[in-house]
Amino acid sequence: MKITFLGTGTSQGIPIIGSKHPVCLSKNKKDKRLRVSVLVEWENYSYVIDCGPDFRYQMLRSGCTKLDGIVFTHEHSDHVLGLDDIRPFYFMHGDLPIYAHSRVLNELKKRFNYIFETKNKYPGAPTVIEHEIKNEPFKLKNIEVMPINGLHGKLQVFGYKFQNFAYLTDMKTVADEEIEKIKNVDVLVVNALREKPHHSHFNLEEALVFIKKVSPKKAYLTHISHLLGFHDEVEKTLPENVFLAYDGLELFI
Ligand SMILES: [Zn+2]
């Protein structure tokens, strides 16, 4: 299984438009972060987790030309706004499967009503095939995916475990029975926004406590704000098996 980090930044992306913060002005490529998403590939199959406003560029940059579906964590704009840009995939390969909680599917129908239209649909609008995710395992092709339920402030969000890879973003609270599902995975990805606490995201300290509980072989932090600091400096301060993810990072699991 190959994982490509398509984006590792918080909701505004880094650099932030107009910001003079030193991290936003950094020349290091690892300090440039598009909105969070990962590409998960195995055999001939390719899925993305989330589809934010940078989706089009992320597909071009990663060279992804065939997509088997999109799995959504939740409905916030930084995770869904690229849905219109599935059009090239739709023109090439037809209706695109999407997987999400029923609430998220309903939110997508409000924002992208023309995609879900069944009568007098605008020619050129893409069509998706809806798959509702409940908190139970589901199949993507020949593998089973395990949802991990959590809270982003008060909002329910799903993380996902694909075999020995777990991807959790926008988490603030995860119940112990959900942590059990991902204990000792090979690779855990989890959000860590900044040092200061935040009402709906793990800060760095909370993310590190969470990683200890999960006890993965390796952990990568994502959904990072410029306020966390420079990539190269922050990484020096992390425990041995914890790393900052960065855009373009590829993992083979
Ligand atoms: Zn987010």
Image (tube, grey):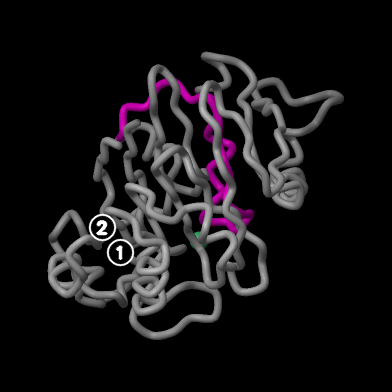
Image quarter of residue 237: bottom left
**Label 2 to label 1, Cα distance in Å?**
6 Å
Asked if the residue at tag 1 contacts the one at tag 2, i.e. Cβ–Cβ closer than 8 Å, the answer is yes
**Which of 213/132 is in front?**
213
* Of the image marks 2 and 1, the number of the one nearer the N terminus: 1
Q: Quadrant of residue 16?
A: bottom left
Extent of the magenta region: 62-88
Which circle marks residue 15 in the picture? 1
Q: Which amino acid does label 1 sit on?
A: Pro
Query: Closer to the camera, 14 or 212?
Result: 212
Q: Is residue 203 left or right of residue 31?
A: right
Amino acid type for the residue under numbered disc 2: Lys
Q: In this view, does 6 lie to the left or right of 30?
A: right
Residue 52, above or below 152: above
Instruction: From the top left corner, tell me how far across and down residue 73 is, in percent.
Output: 57, 51
- At 74% from the left and 25% from the top, the residue drawn is 122
The location of residue 211, given as percent across then percent down, is 37, 66
In magenta stretch: residue 84? yes
Under tag 1, what secondary structure? loop
| Residue to which mark 2 is pinned | 32
